[in-house]
Amino acid sequence: QVQLVQSGAEVKKPGASVKVSCKASGYTFTSYGISWVRQAPGQGLEWMGWISAYNGNTNYAQKLQGRVTMTTDTSTSTAYMELRSLRSDDTAVYYCVRDNPMTTVVTLYDYWGQGTLVTVSS
Amino acid sequence: DIQMTQSPSSLSASVGDRVTITCRASQSISNYLNWYQQKPGKAPKLLIYAASSLQSGVPSRFSGSGSGTDFTLTISSLQPEDFATYYCQQSYSTPHTFGQGTKLEIK
């Protein structure tokens, strides 16, 4: 069965970086993409960006440009999301989601990771 | 960025009721509209994609309609497990913005 298993909760200080992993199983990793969505405590959902595990193409939210990097390791079927220069308003649950490998227009979003809580606090 | 506005923000209803949630886009998004259900402490779950296509495994009491800027999610007969928060999301252009959510509560 398809599963996306994310790394555990993190506590970081302002200005630090965090790297969240998302290990996929139950499907051919390189036939899909991965999107990342975050949710601040008690708030709505925010799209962060997309990476194709097929060809490595990325598309990041403009507001995160320069601070976020999404990568994949096809040898381990794992996607990564690194966020730098953390601020208190980056405190959120971060989700990886299975997505289309070729385009951001036609989405899949059929399988989600369990979420990773990242807390940014001094 | 395309703004997605859901209404109402919250809704009280009873088991068996028919419920409709609306989502309006700030510009035309064709049918690139998805609906999700989220329960506390859980990841969102895809219900409807491409405005009106039912995701595999989702009960048929859920349906979606609309095109352009105005969309609706309808639950034909509420079940106890349907009480949750619902979000719409456009994928017409990045960033893929979500509505603010509609919290469906038991009356």
Image: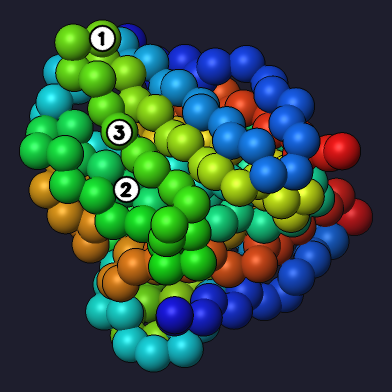
Q: Position of residue A96 (x, y in %)?
A: 44, 34
- From the image, tell me which residue sits under label 1: A76
Do tag 2 and tag 3 residues touch (Cβ < 8 Å)?
Answer: no
Q: CA distance from mark 2 to mark 1?
A: 19 Å
Q: Which mark is residue A97?
A: none
Quick one: which residue is furthest to the bottom in this view?
A: B27
Q: CA distance from mark 2 to mark 3?
A: 10 Å
- Type of amino acid at the residue the image marks with label 2: Trp
Nearer to us in this view, A51 or A87? A87
- Type of amino acid at the residue the image marks with label 1: Thr
- Badge 2: chain ID: A
Marker count (numbered): 3
**Residue mark closest to the camera, 1 vs 3:** 3
* Residue A111 falls in image quadrant: top left
Q: Which mark is residue A50?
A: 2
- Type of amino acid at the residue the image marks with label 3: Thr
Q: CA distance from mark 1 to mark 3?
A: 12 Å
- From the image, tell me which residue sits under label 3: A71
- Badge 1: chain ID: A
